[in-house]
Image: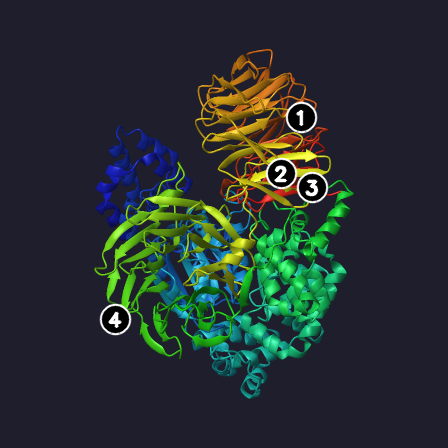
Amino acid sequence: MDAKARNCLLQHREALERDIKTSYIMDHMISNGVLTLSEEEKVKNEPTQCQRAALLIKMILKKDNYAYISFYNALLHEGYKDLAALLHGGLPVVSSSNSKDSVAGITSYVRTVLCEGGVPQRPVVFVMRKKLVNAVQQKLFKLNGEPGWVTIYGMAGCGKSVLAAEAVRDHSLLEVCFPGGVHWVSIGKQDKSGLLMKLQNLCARLDQDESFSQRLPLNIEEAKDRLRILMLRKHPRSLLILDDIWDPWVLKAFDNQCQILLTTRDKSVTDSVMGPKYVIPVESGLGKEKGLEILSLFVNMKKADLPEQAHSIIKECKGSPLVVSLIGALLRDFPNRWDYYLRQLQNKQFKRIKKSSSYDYEALDEAMSISVEMLREDIKDYYTDLSILQKDVKVPTKVLCILWDMETEEVEDILQEFVNKSLLFCDRNGKSFLYYLHDLQVDFLTEKNRSQLQDLHKKMITQFQRHHRLHTLSPDQEDCMYWYNFLAYHMASANMHKELCALMFSLDWIKAKTELVGPAHLIHEFVEYRHILDEKDGTVCENFQEFLSLNGHLLGRQPFPNIVQLGLCELETSEVYRQAKLQAKQEVDNGMLYLEWINKKNIKNLSRLVVRPHTDAVYHACFSEDGQRIASCGADKTLQVFKAETGEKLLEIKAHEDEVLCCAFSADDRFIATCSVDKKVKIWNSVTGELVQSYDEHSEQVNCCHFTNNSNHLLLATGSSDYFLKLWDLNQKECRNTMFGHTNSVSHCRFSPDDKLLASCSADGTLKLWDVKSANERKSINVKQFFLNSEESQEDMEVMVKCCSWSADGASLVVAAKNKVLLFNIHTGGLLAEIHTGHHSTIQYCDFSPSNHLAVVALSQYCVELWNMDSCLKVADCRGHLSWVHCAMFSPDGSSFLTSSDDETIRLWETKKVCKNSAIVLKQEIDVVFQENEVMVLAVDNIRRLQVINGKTGQIDYLTEAQVSCCCLSPHLQYLAFGSDDGAIQVLELLNNRLFQSRTRHKNTVRHIQFTTDGKNVISSSDDSAIQVWNWQSEETVSLQAHQETVKDFRLLKNSRLLSWSFDGTVKVWNIITGRIEKDFVCHQDTVLSCDISPDATKFSSTSADKTAKIWSFDLLSPLHELRGHKGCVRCSAFSVDSTLLATGDDNGEIRIWNVSNGELLHSCAPVLVEGGAATHGGWVTDLRFSPDGKMLVSAGGYLKWWNVDSGKSIQTFYTNGTNLKKIHVSPDFKTYVTVDNLGILYVLKILE
């Protein structure tokens, strides 16, 4: 053992002996082969823990360096991080070549780790740059197991990627620093959808057993979060290698407490991220000796024997490893051409590739041209064909087999020639090969063959069409992913507009592609090729783009939705609906089930103005104080100012060197502030666009800025990822105050209406209030506590508080985090209201109206909502954006609001118009009567109006306004009854609007109400324990009182009998004429949640919170069968029409089908778990109904599902806009279904025939 390691162990021996438990540590050391079983036995025989530890350390001191490293890793693995830290300084550096089982100095362990992590193999000719490799390794050791960034930077073609791969080809580095493995990701120049695809692929690679999620993340924010969890929980202490980073914003997706090694041409890319940073510059060229070494290896000569021309060639190549390799590969084939290639390099004047970068491409152009010229004539054209490949894309052999109409072996032979000449690179992927070009080679080929590109793309499409039909592409085919990702690109580049439109406007293509990669890439293609698609039909293009945008949260998510069923929910004027209807009709003939939403209303486009001032995502937009102008900023690094009325552009300023995250008008409208990822805050003259001030005191990106509301003394507040808030006086050069207190990035800040307080919110899960005058913290509200589950601790949970906004009176603050909007009293810190948006997306922004109690909420899932903060009811849905919405802000008078989005647009909405046109929000307590061909729905809306809705025509008859809590229709639609919050019962005669009121009231809110079959009596139950039977014509009332707790519900039986069940665990049978109990069943220890009566009237079922269901005979007081097996509360049950089957549904989304006669389980309709453990029903199963023939079952929960009773398999799913369906009303013929979701939307669905 090294003296340093030995001394370190001796120095900390006492602390180790005192604290460690040896048994688990020895398990690790035995599995590493550094401790024997007999040694373990000796340690175990010691009487005390301290003595066992002492003997183990004594043994380690007699062993080698590997024993020390194994002991160190065991301490880390068993949670002794503090003790491991003591030993870290003594870690010996073990040369990989000393290790057993090594090939070329690389152990089998290293080979396995790098192969699993996708690290590229060494190039054909490899020269070790030991000094640089050691520098990279030293920086990686410095990370010390903590998150941080090691950057290798240098010019294109200088060998950065080879260096990164070589640095991790070291046994001790991997074992000591990265026992969790290494994961290589080739990034390159990317847009957002391209980055999302890279992240999706990485998440899939890290979660191959799908233990964390069965669906791909749908946006970058979600992917970042998934990656963080996977790296933390499944791959702790692993290294992520990001190859070829171009843009700082890309790194933000990986900025989540990982250890990262990256290669880049721009060393400033890490300025936008947090944590320790180490940089290794790679000189632009190889030294002369290294260059000669590469040449000597290619031509198989000793360096000393190389001819004089070799020295001149290295000089002409400017030391580029890529260029030297190209020339070396040529000389290997033609060893007598030293003079010829040198002359070519010296004399030939090649056309420079016109690029925006400052790198010297000339030597590469020359080397590439010579290399291509020297290819055999019969394979030159094949290399030209590679001009259509995109940068950073690895192409499977199979794609080129199709392009060239050849067998795999023939193609691989040709490509190997290119690889040997360094004209192409190869990666092994399992059994198959992937080929790719260096991006400089792509530039060269594109420039050289520009005139042929269209024809080459056309050839690719023609060959694809010969070999594949779209619907026959299957995910297990080697080339499948390539076609899904790049078919549209090749069609557009080939100018094949007709074919591109046919592809993009095809539901089959959308279904297949979204199931593989989610909707983001498709939406990107609709934006990218909009100019082509609009030529065919702009409306059709919009239909498809909107369909993808509005269903983005479902598409690409497991279980995959039926895209035809989703299409049937579109407006009947939509091309998507037309295609879906055609497909559905064909499939219905083959026995498939589809549903038409027959009462869907036209969703009007409610936005008043749509402007596209930016060329990339719009992160923020705001009104001027006079409401006449709008300022906006975004990912294109500009600030734009335009007229609010017309959208006419007034100013365009290149404001920052990186993305601009926020902008704000001053109270007097003279100034606009901007803040950016470049860490700067700038103040601009809002009329001339001149720069007034620039501040750069923040050390990380600045996320938000806001001016005081009073123009007499202007102050600006800014919040940053450096955890600080700063106050700036525009008359001073430096910041006035810095506010300390947040423990994570500050995401948003706002001054109170009177400017006395500043509110700020942060990724640390808190909302803080600061005194503006003193800059002291006044109050801190822990928002995180409102998201805790019973199992979670505050430390484990991350809640980013995104946004805050003051009420007009300054007494309360609305706050957005995750998918909740919370309203706090600023004086007490108490929670006044809570709104759960019920979406799968997160809230990006919220703003309180200055003139009323409305809040506008922007969601990542493309939609914007208006909520009434008094009633906690949603007032309006604003659909129109085609991508993530980042910001939503009211105008100063509240009459309108704006929204900005990733789709590069800003939309203006009129508040009144939006509220007026939005569909009426219904309460979920409805009653439905199916009469001949009619569907009549009785419902209460959000403004307490009682209404009868014709389910087919949508006609609404408003009846009366009352504090209605529940309602029902009489069997022949002559009367309706309703209960109120104050316990009153009323009956309304529909013909003449006569109202009858019960003299006897319930003590509490009425929960359930029903007419008897003759319509003469109304039965009701309430939060008290009594049931009332009211003959509303004779005004007699019978009270049924015996339950000890609240009655859950009741059901009418024949012969004036009633079945009721309660929280007290009992079920009772009553005579409603006499008011007496005839049967009293003690059914469950816990609440009885539901009962159903068999159609033959001999039995009933009971289900309970005790996770059981029971089948009872009305003649016996003990159950016929107790049905066990559910893992959650059993919430509902239903008998089949022939009384032979019983279905039960629980809170985990599981449905079980039982044989009634013997109580046996026939089928389990098990939930498909998706991310976060949400089940098939998004939670509870709340209602069940059998078809008359007993072959089908419909269930309600998060949405509606139809099941095959014989197989237990799902037949169809109907996704409602909202969730948490309480009940499903089904017509006697099982063809019409009615329900209301938690957003108050009514669904009348009919089976398509």
Identify which amino acid the numbered label 1 is placed on.
Ser
Identify which amino acid the numbered label 4 is placed on.
Glu
Comparing marks 1 and 2, which lies closer to the viewer?
2
Q: Dot 3 surroundings within 10 Å: few (below 14), some, or many (20 or more)?
A: some
Q: Which of the two residues, 1224 or 795, is positioned nearer the viewer here?
A: 1224
- The residue at which mark 3 appears reads as 1246
Residue at 30 percent of width and 35 percent of height: 21
Comparing marks 3 and 2, which lies closer to the viewer?
2
Q: Which of the two residues, 213 or 313, is positioned nearer the viewer here?
A: 213
Q: Residue furthest right?
A: 589
Q: Position of residue 40 (x, y in %)?
A: 35, 34
Q: Which of the two residues, 615 or 1224, is positioned nearer the viewer here?
A: 1224
Identify which amino acid the numbered label 3 is placed on.
Lys
Comparing marks 3 and 4, which lies closer to the viewer?
3
Comparing marks 1 and 4, which lies closer to the viewer?
1
The answer to which of marks 3 and 4 sits earlier in the sequence is 4
Q: Quadrant of residue 270?
A: bottom left
- The residue at which mark 1 appears reads as 1136
Q: Secondary structure at mark 3?
A: strand
Report the Cα–Cα distance between label 1 and label 2. 25 Å
The circle drawn on residue 937 is 2
The answer to which of marks 4 and 2 sits earlier in the sequence is 4
Q: Position of residue 1135 (x, y in %)?
A: 64, 25
Q: Given contact means CB atoms under 8 Å apart, are the residues at marks 3 and 4 in contact? A: no
Establish if 1066 lies above or below 636: above
Q: Secondary structure at mark 1?
A: loop
